[in-house]
Image (spheres, rainbow, N blue to C red):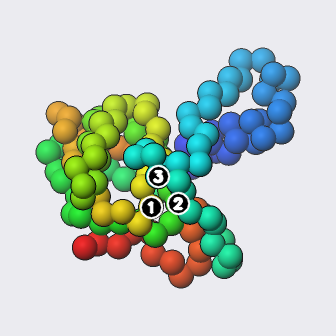
């Protein structure tokens, strides 16, 4: 986990300082840059409270389905392995495969299901505020 966080920190540092080209062998690939979630909805404004960043590594076993839930904060992730299908309450569907990024829906009921043969592992970054839940179950 520390190794992944160190790599992410290095990539973010190099990308934000604009010096990636100064370091031989380092490449930066932009996985997502958007003001919208995967279903096309505009992301809400950031909260005015004290910010809190949370990074989770979530593993979903093959065939498992998460309960219907929503996120009151902006979050985005990258599926590291496996397959994951995300379905909103109004039946909008997104299929993710290993390496795919996701900018998640905010304040919309949805659930995820591992539709692959092995575990689905995703790292998710939440940009919230202190004392605000990351997930609310229905």
**2 or 16: which is nearer to us?**
16
Residue 135 drawn above or below residue 49: above
Nearer the camera: disc 3 or disc 2: 3
Q: Callout 2: 10 Å neighbours few (<14), some, many (20+)?
A: many
Q: Is residue 16 left or right of residue 59?
A: right
| Disc 3 to disc 2, C-alpha distance | 12 Å
Which residue is pictured at 74% across the width and 36% down the height? 15
Quarter-wise, where is residue 93 in the image? top left
Say which residue label 1 marks.
Answer: 106
Q: State if disc 1 and disc 3 touch (CB < 8 Å).
A: yes
Which residue is pictured at 37% across the width and 31% down the height? 98
- Specify which label sits upstream in the sequence, 3 or 2: 3
Residue farthest along the left direction in this orientation: 63
Which residue is pictured at 40% across the width and 39% down the height? 79
Say which residue label 2 marks.
Answer: 74
Residue farthest along the top direction in this orientation: 24
Quarter-wise, where is residue 107 in the image? bottom left
Q: Please identify the quadrant where the C terminus is shown.
A: bottom left
Query: Where is residue 84 drawn, in percent x and y?
Result: 28, 41
Residue 79 drawn above or below residue 52: above
Q: Is residue 2 left or right of residue 108?
A: right
**56 or 106: which is nearer to us?**
106
**2 or 89: which is nearer to us?**
89
Q: Secondary structure at mark 1?
A: loop
| Disc 1 to disc 2, C-alpha distance | 6 Å
Residue 107 drawn above or below residue 92: below
Q: State if disc 2 and disc 3 touch (CB < 8 Å).
A: no
**47 or 76: which is nearer to us?**
47
Say which residue label 3 marks.
Answer: 41
Please tell me the numbered disc located at residue 12. Answer: none
Which residue is pictured at 41% across the width and 37% down the height? 80
- Specify which label sits upstream in the sequence, 1 or 2: 2
């Amino acid at each position: 986990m520390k190794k992944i966080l160190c790599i992410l920190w290095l990539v973010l540092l190099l990308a934000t300082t604009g010096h990636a080209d100064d370091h031989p062998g380092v490449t930066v690939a932009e996985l997502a840059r958007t003001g919208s979630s995967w279903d096309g909805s505009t992301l809400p404004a950031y909260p005015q409270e004290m910010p809190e960043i949370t990074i989770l590594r979530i593993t979903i076993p093959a065939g498992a389905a998460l309960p219907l839930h929503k996120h009151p904060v902006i979050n985005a992730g990258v599926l590291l392995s496996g397959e994951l299908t995300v379905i909103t309450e109004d039946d909008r569907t997104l299929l993710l495969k290993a390496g795919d990024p996701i900018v998640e829906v905010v304040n919309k009921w949805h659930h995820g299901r591992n539709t692959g043969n092995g575990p689905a592992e995703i790292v998710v970054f939440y940009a919230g505020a202190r004392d605000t839940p990351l997930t609310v179950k229905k």
